[in-house]
Image: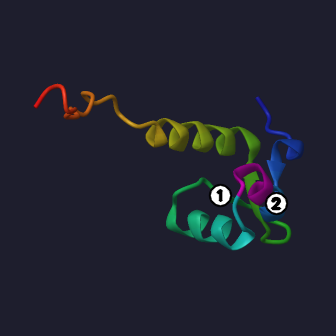
Amino acid sequence: MKTKLSEYVKVAEAAEILGVSQGTVRAWAEAGKIPMHKNPANGYRLFRREELEEFLEKIAKQAVPKQSSPLRTHTSESM
């Protein structure tokens, strides 16, 4: 299956999709936090939409707080 160029976005659009600055997208790409591809013709950083969506799903799952036991509160009746 051949990948289409329309499946890729540049830094500015990736930043919009992720809700962060362009600098953050570049930093995350360089750190390997998000997959990055380079256009062989001009060296532009490119990001596959599908991979950005997968990244968002991954961090959303990590952001969900784990269920813990309810905090015990003392009331004047229990003391």
Query: Is 63 inside the magenta-drawn segment?
Result: no
Amino acid found under the numbered disc labelled 2: Lys
Q: Is residue 67 above or below residue 31?
A: above
The residue sitting at 78% across, 71% down in the picture is 43
**What residue span does the magenta drawing correspond to?**
14-19
How far across and down, in percent of the image, does residue 8 sit?
81, 48
Amino acid found under the numbered disc labelled 1: Met
Please state if 57 lies on the left or on the right of 42 as rendered: left
Mark 2, secondary structure of its residue? loop
Q: Nearer the viewer, residue 10 or 25?
A: 25
Residue count near mark 2 (Cα–Cα under 10 Å), binned few <14, some 14–19, many ≥20: some
- Position of the C terminus, as image quadrant, is top left
How far across and down, in percent of the image, does residue 55 sit?
59, 44
Q: Residue furthest left?
A: 79
Q: Which mark is residue 63?
A: none
Q: Residue furthest right?
A: 6
Q: Which residue is mark 2?
A: 10
Residue count near mark 1 (Cα–Cα under 10 Å), binned few <14, some 14–19, many ≥20: many
Q: Which quarter of the picture shows residue 49?
A: top right
How far across and down, in percent of the image, does residue 78 sit?
14, 26
Q: Is residue 69 above or below residue 34?
A: above
Q: Which mark is residue 36?
A: 1
Name the magenta segment's main secondary structure: helix
The residue sitting at 60% across, 63% down in the picture is 29
Mark 2 / mark 1, whichever is N-terminal = 2
Q: Is residue 13 above or below residue 21?
A: above
